[in-house]
Amino acid sequence: MDGSTFPEIRSTCPYCGVGCGVLLRADGQGGLDVRGDPDHPANRGRLCSKGSALAETVGPEGRLLTPRIGGQQASWADALGLVADKFRAAIDRYGPDSVAFYVSGQLLTEDYYVANKLMKGFIGSANIDTNSRLCMASTVAGHKRAFGTDTVPGTYEDLEEADLVVLVGSNLAWCHPVLHQRLLAAKQARGTRIVVIDPRRTATCDGADMHLALQPGSDVALFNRLLAMLYKGGLVDRRFLRHTDGFDAALKAACADDTGVTGLSDAQIDAFCQLWLKTEKVVTVFGQGVNQSSSGSDKVNAILNCHLASGRIGKPGMGPLSVTGQPNAMGGREVGGLANMLACHLDIENPDHRTAIRDFWQAPAVPDASGLKAVDMFRAVGDGRIKALWIIHTNPAVSMPDADIVSAAIKGCDFTVVSDITAATDTARLADVLLPATAWAEKDGTVTNSDRTISRQRSTLPPPGQARPDWAILAEVGRRMGFARAFDYTSPAEIFREYARLSGIAGRFGRDFDISGLMDLTDADYDRLLPTRWPITETRRGGRFFGDGVFFHGDGKGRLIPVTYRAPAAQTGPRFPLRLNTGRVRDQWHTMTRTGLSPRLSAHLAEPFLEIHPVDASAYGISPADLLRVISPNGQAILRARITDAVQPGQVFAPMHWTGETAPSARIDALVAPVVDPVSGQPESKASVVAVTRFPAAWYGFAVSGGEICPKSAYWARMRTYAGWRIEMAGDVVPHDWEAEARRLFNLPDAAASMISDVAKGSVRIAFFAEGKLLAALFVARKPVAVMRDYLAGLPAQEAAGVLSGHPPADVPDPGPVLCSCFNVGINTILRAIEGDGLTSVAAVGLALQAGTNCGSCRPEIGALLHAAQISEAAE
Ligand SMILES: Nc1nc2c(c(=O)[nH]1)N[C@H]1C(S)=C(S)[C@@H](COP(=O)(O)OP(=O)(O)OC[C@H]3O[C@@H](n4cnc5c(=O)[nH]c(N)nc54)[C@H](O)[C@@H]3O)O[C@H]1N2
Ligand SMILES: Nc1nc2c(c(=O)[nH]1)N[C@H]1C(S)=C(S)[C@@H](COP(=O)(O)OP(=O)(O)OC[C@H]3O[C@@H](n4cnc5c(=O)[nH]c(N)nc54)[C@H](O)[C@@H]3O)O[C@H]1N2
Ligand code: SF4
Ligand SMILES: [Mo]
């Protein structure tokens, strides 16, 4: 069939919580055309670099195609029979709390609903927790303390109506790029002021008016000062405060707090507070710099206190806005995916809520106490209390703090099931049973984004192999465990209707989450469902919360919570002098199982790294591109040094994305201590303590290859390219025969080789050819290898006679690392245009090179290059 005859299907991007609409068209050969949906309210046609590259991630590569038991291919009947038997046996022998599910904010609502119903209603335990514990738990706890429910008061439109937007612990430019573009467009249109509060200078700072590089963990003290200033400035909204309790106590705590801990000058703090005070329409956006902290819930409430005290909440252009990470982090919270919640924002501690749920599900048992939260759950796996564990749609062997201990716990568990789309992940390698799930483009269901908008994901591609949707796998296990009627679902629409009906009951308890207006959707209605913001009832649709002063605590009032600064749990000292911050890069998604398949996305930052300040680098004798050994009390890593003043002295930053599959010595969570916020149970992923030394490499290597590379060295990190792979390596022992080593590395025992070596310099260069075309090339040196990587990465399968020089022929300029991944434009190309043609604006760079003109995700980085060029010109 001609590709153009396939219909265009509306769906939602499977990455971040912005929840952009996409239009998908199957190309008839297993591939997909993807464009932004101009009618989706979240993005109105825009996509970021990750969304634009979705088509490169849907192929068959790496997919898990059949169930496996003990590594051997198995039938669905055998695999599911075994799962049901093992869970049943553990429950019968050790009780319902001896089993656990660890699930994900990337599950669709329908998948999530079934998992939660099976565990909390039918197995009768609350031991279901989710990776949202590592992500949104502090926000959930903060919202519940202040509002009585986990409610996001505002909407995305508030960003466009605000006059001041404060971004706290959020690298919006890289992590929610389309929302960031909406904000920058608003700035251009109406002069919105933007303040970034982040210990690190990020791409988000490039579009900001003010950057407060506070000390890690000190946000509470900063917002406490703001609360005190609101009071002193007479800006407390007394009328609104009548709808709340706790102002006096919160103010007292705030006034006693010490802003010295922020490391900011009084002038900086003053400038920020004055801006806040004099601007009525303020939105405070907060991300993981707030949540992933041992005082995360207090940080959230410190922010909410200021909005409540000034009455700036739930009105156009005003309010706190927690940006969710995963596409369905919100849906998971709504559905009760956390161990301390019931479905539809009902409370596990409330006997009436429990009874309502039990009656609705006709469930044998609903637990009356919270289950194990993620960190405690994996502890219980480790010490044998959990006998059977099912991990769905998440990769905890990489992403949990203390990842080495978590991996060992999973490995040691009596029985572990992993449902994934990818055959080889760090977690899948530890499973007893592997179950193949259908992936994003193959499945149907709904997700809720950061502003409560529910959107459909719609299947566009056929499932490969024997893959099945997550809800169907869960329901089948439910049936096999003896709950035939409760899990007799045949479609996601049916699950959604049941869920919408349950939310109506929650609504009658006065809960916020009520989508009962959707409970009578026919299958056809569900298929057609347009993006809709909840609540959705007979009397109410979407809108904002709390502007009217109505809250969800028993007395109908909101609460200000007294909070005071607490330092991060781990203290730096002589043994571990540096504070380790972790987070994300622009073009990779978490453990890279999908974005890592895209050559386009893999070209932006091709290696794991540690950002370290020049002052620390010189104190530790570190030069650019050195490899560093990074040690914490919990584990260690080897990372490439990036010397930059984007981080402060005494602080270092590393990305979270690399894994045993991509760079085994760079799994950063091996170093992160499993300390949590006492209220939310969320781990402190951003404030570990480490020591750094040079890794004493005897040799450094860089290689490109058209085929798989099988590295064994102490350090390696590999990435996809259009021509195959590229890899960085280093070792502490020099192989005695480099040609033999290279043949092994590339699995090319017989290929024709050409080689240059300079024994005195420790330099070796080997290339392998077949029929005049390059198969693979290896470059080795005693120092970090100086070759033009981005040029070499394109050479496999080309006639590349000059490859061993490591540089392009003189007339071909080196583009440098890719900055604009849509049009494949490198940094050097952009710099040459800025300098050579005297370009002074992002728009001019776009006109000259196209860079930044499609998805726009690289525009902040182009801005930074322009800025740096202007500074250096001024200095000349
Ligand atoms: N490209 C990309 N985008 C993503 C994802 C991805 O993997 N890749 N993942 C998605 C997910 S699940 C999530 S949760 C979001 C996360 O989105 P963000 O929260 O924006 O991302 P992070 O990089 O984790 O952290 C944000 C910032 O917090 C800062 N920070 C660290 N400590 C502190 C502190 O004490 N105070 C303050 N104020 N700031 C601090 C860090 O320096 C960092 O710049 O991104 C989503 N979007
Ligand atoms: N140090 C540090 N650690 C962190 C963070 C940090 O900032 N710093 N951030 C934390 C946060 S906020 C988050 S959200 C987590 C994310 O961490 P994870 O959830 O562990 O990371 P992902 O790579 O998104 O894992 C998703 C898995 O699901 C699989 N998958 C994809 N589609 C499907 C599907 O449809 N069905 C099924 N069954 N499987 C599928 C993928 O192949 C992959 O293995 O990491 C946390 N860990
Ligand atoms: S901002 Fe990017 S990653 Fe997030 S939903 Fe939109 S296209 Fe997907
Ligand atoms: Mo997240």
Image (tube, rainbow, N blue to C red):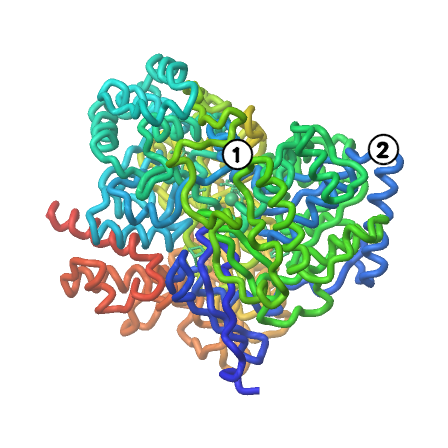
Using residue 740 as the reference point, say whether residue 480 is left or right of it: right
Q: Mark 2: few, some, or many residues within 10 Å (few <14, many ≥20)? A: some
Using residue 794 as the reference point, say whether residue 505 is left or right of it: right
Badge 1 marks a residue whose secondary structure is: loop
Residue 812 image-quadrant placement: bottom left
Query: In terms of sequence position, does the residue under pointer 2 or pointer 1 come before the other?
Result: 2
Residue type at the position of mark 1: Thr
Residue 389, image x and y in percent? 74, 42
Residue type at the position of mark 2: Tyr
Decide if residue 504 is in sight here. Answer: yes
For image coordinates 84% across by 52% down, the residue present is: 480
- Marks counted in the figure total 2
Q: Nearer the viewer, residue 838 or 763?
A: 838
For image coordinates 69% across by 44% down, the residue present is: 116
Q: Nearer the viewer, residue 738 or 136?
A: 136
Q: Nearer the viewer, residue 742 or 455?
A: 455
Which disc is residue 94 wearing?
Answer: 2
Pick out the residue farthest to the front.
Answer: 539
Q: Mark 1: few, some, or many residues within 10 Å (few <14, many ≥20)? A: many
Badge 2 marks a residue whose secondary structure is: helix
**Could you tell me which quadrant the N terminus lies in?**
bottom right
Using residue 209 as the reference point, say whether residue 375 is left or right of it: right
Which disc is residue 232 wearing?
Answer: none
Residue 100 image-quadrant placement: top right
Distance from disc 2 to disc 1, alpha carbons, whole Å, reads 34 Å
Using residue 438 as the reference point, say whether residue 329 is left or right of it: left
Residue under pointer 1? 149
Residue 609, image x and y in percent? 44, 45
